[in-house]
Image: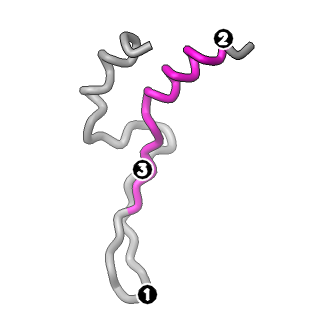
Amino acid sequence: MLRKFGFTWPSQIGTPGGGNHFIELCVDENQQVWIMPHLGSRGIDNVIGCYFIPVRT
């Protein structure tokens, strides 16, 4: 399982990815700035799912 993910994770560090992943700057009613990221889990969830789904079914 780790062999499949081991080659992709270094290139994903520090990036938001694609699809619906984003980093948004927000300002609240007190003029405080917040960073709201939605990054998902990137590739690791897919690797884990592909490993365990055949075992489960």
**Mark 2 vs 1, N-terminal side:** 1
Label located before the other in sequence (2 or 3): 3
Place of residue 41 in the rendered image (x, y in percent of width and height, measured from the top left):
45, 37
Query: Is 25 on the left-hand or right-hand side of 53?
Result: left
Circle 3: element type: strand
In the picture, the disc for residue 5 is none
Q: Does the magenta segment cover residue 49? A: yes
In the image, the segment drawn in magenta is 36-55
Q: In the depicted view, which residue is nearer to us: 47 or 52?
A: 52
Q: Circle 1 sits in a helix, a strand or a loop, which is it?
A: loop
Instruction: Identify which residue, 57 or 17, lies in the foreground.
Output: 57
Residue drawn where x is 44% and y is 27% of the image:
44
**Picture quadrant where residue 12 is located:** top left
* Residue 39 picture quarter: top left
Identify the residue shown where x is 43% and y is 33%. 42
Near mark 2 (Cα within 10 A), the count class, few <14, some 14-19 or many ≥20, is: few
Image location of residue 57, percent across then percent down: 74, 13
